[in-house]
Amino acid sequence: MAWTGLAKGLSQTFSWVSTVIVARLLTPQDYGLVGMATLFFWAIQSLGEFGLGAAIVKRRDLPDEQIAQVNTVAVLFGLAGMAVVCAAAGPMSVFFATPELQAVMMVTSLTFLVSGFRTVPSALLQRDLRFKRLAANDTVLALSQAASALLLAWLGFGYWSLVLASVIGTALGTVALVSARPFRFAVPHHPTIRAVTTLGGEVVVARMGWYAMFNADFLVAGKVLGKGPLGHYSFAWTLASLPVEKISLLVTRVSLPFFSAVQDRATSLRRYLLAMTEGLSLVTFPTAIGIGLLADDVVRIALGPKWAGAALPLQILAVVAPIRSIATLLPQITTIVGETRFGMRHSIGSAFVMAAAFFVGSRWGTAGIALAWILVYPVLLLPLLRVILGRLECKLRDYFAALRPALVGSAVMTAAVLGVGLLAENLGWGTAVRMPLQIAVGAVAYFASLWTFDRSSVMATWRFVQSARRG
């Protein structure tokens, strides 16, 4: 986590600066166009990997010959994914009534030409707990993508700056990853690797369900509301999710290999799940909610008046972002405890329910779509949570007890931030004084709440981190 956190911190700082500058150089329509392209692209990317990486991490006893066969299969799926994206580019451009979308999708599909080579090296590095190497690769990818987007936007490439930056970042990151953990290829023999492909198939169908659920809102916004509102909504989603997703990735990148290492010990799995959930909530809850509380100022000052339509959905999406962050651990547990089939059915059913909720919410614009996340998504997590906790012999109240410190602290922080805002408004203070004061008071209130009401929980989490680092 230390290596991953260092890499993410450095790359995130540069990415945030780059994102703000690029947003000022581009338009909501540019982001909306690229958002349409990524709807289909990321779905095929998940299918192209076919869950093979997760299967390698879980099946720690695979011989080299089988891994070599899987390596070949991963590359073949990557090439097939590129072909599928190119074939779908024309119909997708007709569906969205956006002719330029076809060229964007075809160029973006080039990432499949190289990404198929990264599946096995990445999985092996995770399985071997070589996170220093993985952190270096992530840094190369993030920095090259952010720098490329910034340079190309400054040169006037418009939406092509986002497209080409994705291709450049993926290519350089793949080269770094394969150089760090090269592995040979072998002719696939299906009976030999059937167990791996079966597990991978169940994992990838579950991922496709999760993907559909997490992108149905963009599909509805693009089709029903158009490019402009989609651009506002997608950028609001990015702002609400970016810090939370990076923090979640810090934990989920290391959690699956550790879950795999203790997969036969329910007590250890339960301890890791509860401790990681509490640790994630302590960081992501105040971060996301703080962004939501200051959404108007963030959008107005950092992005300018053309992005004013992103403020309201940002406020709403910031509430559900921390829930999404702690939920990222649940699909990993289903893979480890052998509940991939249930996870597959659950994710598909959730995708249909959320798509219907987004369509109904679109009657009230982007805010209505964002509100569907708050009203429906937490309810859909309960069946998955009950199955996982049952396999780990963990009570539901113990799981929610792990969230109590973050919930109480965030409530106190919210009251403090709103109180300072009201006071500043009555005294006539400007944004330059009010916003930094709200941030400072909110941070002090949050940590004071943790130390006052949940000192034992915070210290227990710290001791868990210390013991994990030593062991």
Image: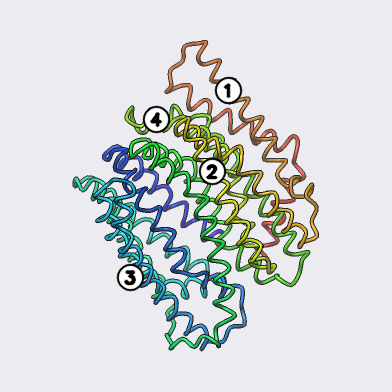
Would you name the residue on which mark 1 appears? 418
> For numbered disc 2, what is the local secondary structure?
helix
| Mark 3 neighbour density, 10 Å: few (under 14) some (14–19) many (20 or more) | some
- Kindly indicate whether the residue at mark 1 contacts the one at mark 3 (C-beta within 8 angstroms): no
Q: How is the model colour-coded?
A: rainbow
> For numbered disc 1, what is the local secondary structure?
helix
Q: For the residue marked with disc 1, what is the amino acid?
A: Leu
Marks 3 and 1 sit apart, C-alpha to C-alpha, by: 50 Å
**Placement of the N terminus among the 4 image quadrants:** bottom right
Q: Nearer the viewer, mark 1 or mark 2?
A: 2
Which label sits on residue 191?
Answer: none
Q: For the residue marked with disc 2, what is the amino acid?
A: Ala
> For numbered disc 4, what is the local secondary structure?
helix
Instruction: Report which quarter residue 418 is drawn in.
Output: top right
Which label sits on residue 309?
Answer: 4
Image-based side of 186 in relation to 199, left or right = left
Give the residue displayed 55% in from the left and 43% down from the top: 321
Give the residue displayed 26% in from the left and 39% down from the top: 25
Which label sits on residue 113?
Answer: 3
| Label whose residue precedes the other's in the sequence (3 or 1) | 3
Q: Position of residue 26 (x, y in %)?
A: 27, 40
Would you name the residue on which mark 2 appears? 356
Image-based side of 438 in relation to 136, left or right = right
| Label whose residue precedes the other's in the sequence (1 or 4) | 4
- Kindly indicate whether the residue at mark 4 contacts the one at mark 3 (C-beta within 8 angstroms): no
| Label whose residue precedes the other's in the sequence (4 or 2) | 4
- Frontmost residue, 141 versus 338: 338
Q: Is residue 393 above or below residue 70?
A: above
Marks 1 and 4 sit apart, C-alpha to C-alpha, by: 22 Å
